[in-house]
Each structure stands twice: as structure tokens, then as C-alpha cells.
Image (cartoon, grey):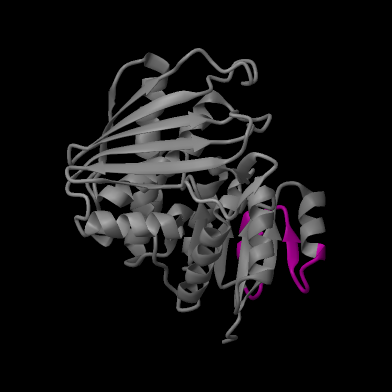
Amino acid sequence: MSSTLGIAVIGTGKMGADHVRRIGRTVGRARVVAVADPDGDRVKEVARDLEGASAHIDPAAAIAAPGVRAVLIASPGPAHEEAILHALERELPVLCEKPLTPEPAGALRIMEAEQRLGRRLVQVGFMRRYDTEYERLKQLLDAGGIGRPLFLHCRHRNAASPSFFTSDMLISDSVVHEVDAARWLLGQEITAVSVLSPTPSSAAPEGLRDPRLVLLETSGGAIVDVEIFVNCGFGYQVRCEAVGETGSARIGDGHAMVVQSAGRWGGEIAQDFTVRFADAYDRQLRGWVAQAARGRVEGPTAWDGYAAAAVSEAGLTAARTGVRTVVELADRPPLYG
């Protein structure tokens, strides 16, 4: 068997194209051998720059292409379940961008498929777990460095939202990152969600309820607040402050360079998530490739994807009704214990 891992990339939009570039330039011992996208012209253009790669409209055909030993899914969320199940039928390791599935029921079906195989093959792309600042905060909390965590204060801001962005996507596609980060940092499940909405920003497109404040309650008695503001205008900014019984710790303030000149000082603010989390994406992909070459995966599980989907579902209900909504979780299967 070749030492180079052959990967099928499903979805060649912004995220998929970025993964293709990373596999080719920053990740060793892997190459893209098949790509799939419903946009036939786009997928052919991507494949044209990949030596020997085949282009497909049908994800199943790409997954079944010669030389494919692992599958990276970066298509829109509603298409994830079908592609993942095709990969699991062939017992191929999968890295799936968030959300695992838009709805909890789909994630449960994926977990059932893994349970039948008796081993994990699905990793969810919650890349913040691979960011060095988040890792340091996790280590501090696990070591009890600031005592029992009481609050997480989270800020998630984008310069502007794409034209297709909806009010629901503020929670299901953006706050979902804070949902997973909170579960991971605290080692607790989220039990209830409340959503508050101020008068929308004048910069928000018509009909978009932006910004919002999302409150998460956890099984360990902590409170997480998330400001989601996707049309802040000035850049991409992610911050998290943990407040414990004996101290606090904050991440997300770092600047690569601060300039002082002509009576002013300032630094750069990343304009895009692929810039702010570039190293995290690289580390996530390198780790996945190393494990997938052995026919296995590590990192965020299908259970993590399911839990995030369940919290998102409760958050959407809370946003629509204005009522605090309890998160309903199935029993955790043994494979994810």
C-alpha cells in the first residue's frame, strides 16, 4: 500500500478549496486523488490543478474512485450525512467540516453506522481544539489553575456576512464553534440555551438579526455567554475569557505586530477565519492525515457533532420563541464514552 494517503475532497467551495491547497502545500504524505462538487465547471477547474485527480459531480463516485483511502467533506451541511454514510460503507476515515449534520437525527444515524462497525471513523472539523491559545486555556482549566470555572465570556465577530447568510446560521454555523469549544474546555454538556436579540445593527442586511447574545447553561453549573456579530465591519475576531473561583484567563487578544508611528499605535486584525486559525487548520489536517493513514481517527467525535447539533437545535428554538430552551440529548453510546 502506498505511503501517500489518497484523499477524496467533497465540496470545492471556499472551505474545500482551502483544504485542497493545504493538502498540496502544507501537509505531507497525502494527495488529493478525487474531488466532487455539484458545480461541474468549478470541480473541473479544481481538478485541473491536481495531477491525476478525477472530477465528479456525485460524491459517491468520488469516494469510490481509485486510490481513495480517506474522505474530507467540506460541502454544505445538508449534504454531509449521505457522503459520510457512503464513506463508512467503505470503512474510510472521514474528516467532516462542521456541522456534522444540521439536525441531531442525522448525527444519530452516523453514530449508529459507526457503532455497527465497532470503531470510530468520523472526525468533526472543530479546529479551535487545535489552536495553541485554546489548548493553553484547556490545560489551565484542566489543571485547576483558576479554580472551578464559573463563566466563559465569548466574542465571535466577522467583518461582514456572505449574501446567503441567515439569522439561523448565526447559531447553527457560527455559534456552533463556541458550543463545541465550551463543551471541550469545561468538560461539561450544555443543558439549556437562551437567545437575546438587540435592535439589529444598521450594517446588517435586511432581515438578518445581527448581532445576538446566546446564553448557554452547562451540566456543571457554569454559564457561557456568546456575542455573535457577523457584520461588525472591522475584521474577524474571536475571544474567550474564562472566569473561575480564584482567577481568570483570556485568549484572542494577540497581535503579530504592533506599530507606533506619527503619534498613533495599532496592529492588524485578521479579516478571515482562514487567517486567524491558519495554524489550527494545518495542525488539525496533519493530525488527521497521520491517523487516517492507519485507518483510524482521533479528535472531535460524531458524538461531539451530535451534541453541537442538539444545542444548535435548542438555540434556534430559543431564538424563534424568546424562551429558554432545554437541550435534549440521547444516551451516549459506548463507542464515545
Q: Quadrant of the N terminus?
A: bottom right
Residue 208 in the image, given as x and y percentages of width and height: 58, 20
Viewer-closest of 210 and 294: 210
Q: Is residue 64 magenta?
A: yes
Q: Is residue 63 above or below residue 144?
A: below
Q: Could you tell me residue 45's position as x and y percent?
A: 82, 57
Q: Is residue 245 positioned above or below 301 on the image? A: above
Q: Residue at x 57, y 85 (%)?
A: 3
The residue positioned farthest toward the front in the image shown: 263
304 vs 286: above or below: above
Q: Is residue 159 left or right of residue 317?
A: right
Report the residue at 39% width, 66% height from top: 298
The structure residue drawn at horizontal position 56% and vertical position 73%, both measured from the top left corner, is 69
* Front residue of 14 and 55: 14
283 falls in the magenta region: no
The answer to whether residue 163 is visible is: yes
Quadrant in which residue 295 is drawn: bottom left
User: Which residue occupies the foreground of this view, 313 or 245?
Assistant: 245
Quadrant where the image shows the C terminus: bottom left
In the displayed structure, 156 sits above or below 278; it is: above
Image position, residue 184 (x, y; %):
32, 51
Whether residue 25 sits left or right of residue 225 in the image: it is right
For this view, does 154 lie left or right of residue 23? left
Q: Position of residue 314 (x, y in %)?
A: 35, 29
Count of residue discs: 0
Q: Which residues are magenta?
A: 48-67
Q: Is residue 300 visible?
A: no
